[in-house]
Image (cartoon, coloured by chain):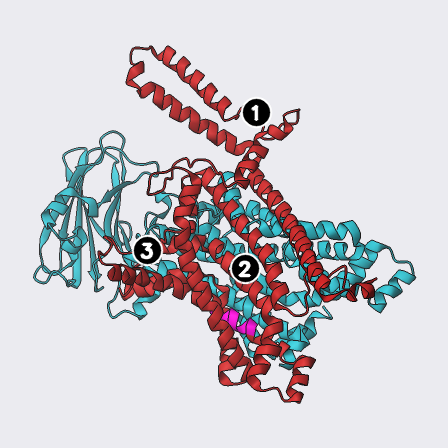
Amino acid sequence: MARAKRLVHPKGRRVQTFLRLLRYTFLRGLAVWIALVVGIFLTIMVANMGGYVDKIKKAQIEESINMQVFQNPAYQNLTTEEKRKLAQQLIQLEIERLELDKPFIRFDKYFWKSRAFRYLGDALVLDFGFAEHIHSTSGSKKVWIIIQERLPYSVLLFTTASLIVFLTSIFVALILSRRYGSIWDRMSVSLAPLSTAPAWFYGIILIMIFAAQLRLLPFGGFVSIPPPKTMLAYAFSVVQHMVLPLLAWFIAYIFASVYSWRTFFLIYSSEDYVEMAKAKGVPGRALERRYILRPTLPPIITSFALMLIGAWMGAIITESVFNWPGLGSLYMQAINGFDTPVIVGLTMIYAYLLGITVFLLDFIYAIVDPRIKVGGGSTA
Amino acid sequence: MRKVLPVLRELTRYKSALGGLIILSFIVGLAIYAVITIPYGEAVRLWRGGEEMWRYNPVNAKPVWVNYFTPQKLPKTLILTSMEDAEIREEPLGKTSKKVFITYTFDYQADVPPSELAIVYKPKFKKKGPLVSVTWTTPDGREIKFGRMSIKSVSGSGSFWYPISLDKQLIKQFGDQKVEEGFFNDPHDERKVLKGKHRVEITAYLFEPGAWIETELVIYGTVHGLAGTDHRRRDIMIALLWGTPVALSFGLAAALGTMITSIIIAALGAWFGGWADSLVQRLTEIRMVIPTLPILIMVGMFFSKSIWTILATLLILNIIESSIKSYRAIFLQEKHAPYIEAAKSYGARNLRIVFRYLIPKIVPMLVPAFVLAVPGYVFLEAALSVLGLGDPVLPTWGKLLSDAQGKGALFQGHYYWVLEPAFMLMLTGFGFTMIGHALDRIFNPKLREI
């Protein structure tokens, strides 16, 4: 069967490849999508904590309505008893509006209409509802708008950080793997344990040295207050604020990264096909690029992608240590203020980012690794 | 044991592993020492104890060893009691009353003034409390009279605290100087401490027959103990010591639990194949899109901050880890190994093959990964504490960092408060990583060649 297929006319084969690619894309997309939906659903269930959050919400509603009724001058001439009755009614209405009187998942004919699924549907179309306390600088309380406002800050800082670490470590590791056993090589190996500590940890230490003791760089934040007027001064101030977080990130990741890439390249450069190429007389540069780097690209790319996502996620603490106004700080703010919709919204965003990355990685693999063929599993 | 000893012997051949072993045994020793000397209940009681428990400690005092690194000599806390360190003189006044003079003299040689001053009155009386006043004579002979008051009631422990540093009259008198500076600094050069003998005389009028008074003069230093104190006067040493067993047990339990469960699941999936395998695969995909830290944060926030809850959540989340994929790949290869075929042919049951043949075979390969995973979890616990989601009762390293961060330790220059837990965290991280890297070379010979 397989043999017969290979004999198809080249043009037909191209169409076939395309169809196969399409099918593969669809199936992978579907699998990731299902995983995403289930993952987000589980997140929603966790966020609800078996009805515990409902209790908190009810208490909040009670408090705010009681306050409204008892402090509203319009109700001044009501007796306390009447006021209490009115408040009770309003609380009941609000609870019914939010369906807090019904279980999170209803096991009756309204099963698919229960809150859990409604939240899921909303979340899937990025409708995270309204924040309870936090608002964007433009004054909106829509979670999605708040997140949109903070996202660029995180992306700016951590994409820069990840890129610097990634490029430096690959470059250094390639050099080291060529000079295996040299003093630099041994030094890089013995420095690897420095990477056990996370970036926020180095952040605290760096703040101590450069901000508290030497007073060279700012403690944290995005730009100095008040912000400089001119464009150039503004940019300079931002860069100044970025130095310490970038450095913390760099120290936290560079050593382990160099160590593992170096080991990785060393293993790959002792593969048979590399020896073969060497024997054939392929020059050093080409050997490195075509025979060592190319087959190692998929793991390199994966690790970069996961590092990037991890950076946006694990940065919760780093950002709050440096008071950087990105998603991480928002998360912190939401935790401290018990702002559930924001927390759930952010968690979903992370889930989405992870899902999309997983999906994209499959493709990048297929493109860069000559040994993997897209959708080739059943036919080739 | 037969298998462990050679590995240990080989480990000692690597210099870094030897260093790691020394660090690790130090940490384990410290953990055991902590658990033995300060039992769990005691540690929690001490750490959660209020002002009452730590009253004799200075606020935010540096560790004692700071004195070796600074040109200035920093004072330790001096507690003088009337029973031991004072001269007591009595003068009868009429039939029932008497006047008691309690005189302390002490030599102050530190280069900075103390951080706080207080007198503790411990009077015994039935109805009418004593009338007290203080005369402080500085080394240059200035006499300062203050603190005239009658003691009407005492606290549960029978003492009355008179915080000299907060005395309004003295604050007014010394103007822009702090009260301690007023007593201890040279009036001609206000930045320098006047060294020499101070004399503090407490005069008490007792109005009842059989009434008595004891006093303590507390001159709070700016250094305390081997670790210093925090903003609530607590000895940081307690958290440093107790953080060790907590960090170790959390790190080890999390790393071990995660690894064991995910190995078993990977092995079962790979062995049985079919729907079991694809279920495991799909679950791994779902797990990949669930972010760990946010989930932990939500659990900590909504449910419980207890370290055991966090550990359980972590285990549940990590049962289906991404590393399952790589374990599965190894198992799929092993599945067709001759010894497995042999086991099958003599009729071993499935579970026996999985647990007695398949899993033990790859365990050695996972030892380095296990050791290397521990510090990650130790830092995770610290991270949660820094976020304010640490265990509410346990004193841990992360708690120290979190307190220090929250109280602006870095702004105020209390570096020891950050550096000490940071050092412990780093030490633990280094210990495990150094051993892990060496183990990696021992168990994965491919790495050894290069």
Q: Position of residue B171 (x, y in %)?
A: 14, 46
The chain that appears cyan in the image is: B
Q: Position of residue A301 (x, y in %)?
A: 56, 65
- Marks 2/1: CA distance? 40 Å
Asked if residue B379 is positioned above or below residue B9 in the image, the reply reads above
Question: Mark 1 is on which residue type?
Answer: Lys
Kindly identify which residue carries mark 1: A102
- Marks 3/2: CA distance? 25 Å
Q: Position of residue A111 (x, y in %)?
A: 64, 28
Q: Which residues are magenta?
A: A254-261
Question: Which of B21/A85 is in front?
Answer: A85
Residue drawn at x 55%, y 47% as measured from the top left: B310
Do we see residue B284 in this rendering?
no
Question: Mark 3 is on which residue type?
Answer: Phe
Asked if residue A56 is positioned above or below residue B448 in the image, the reply reads above
Residues behind callouts 3 and 2 on a single chain: yes
Numbered badge on residue A306: 2
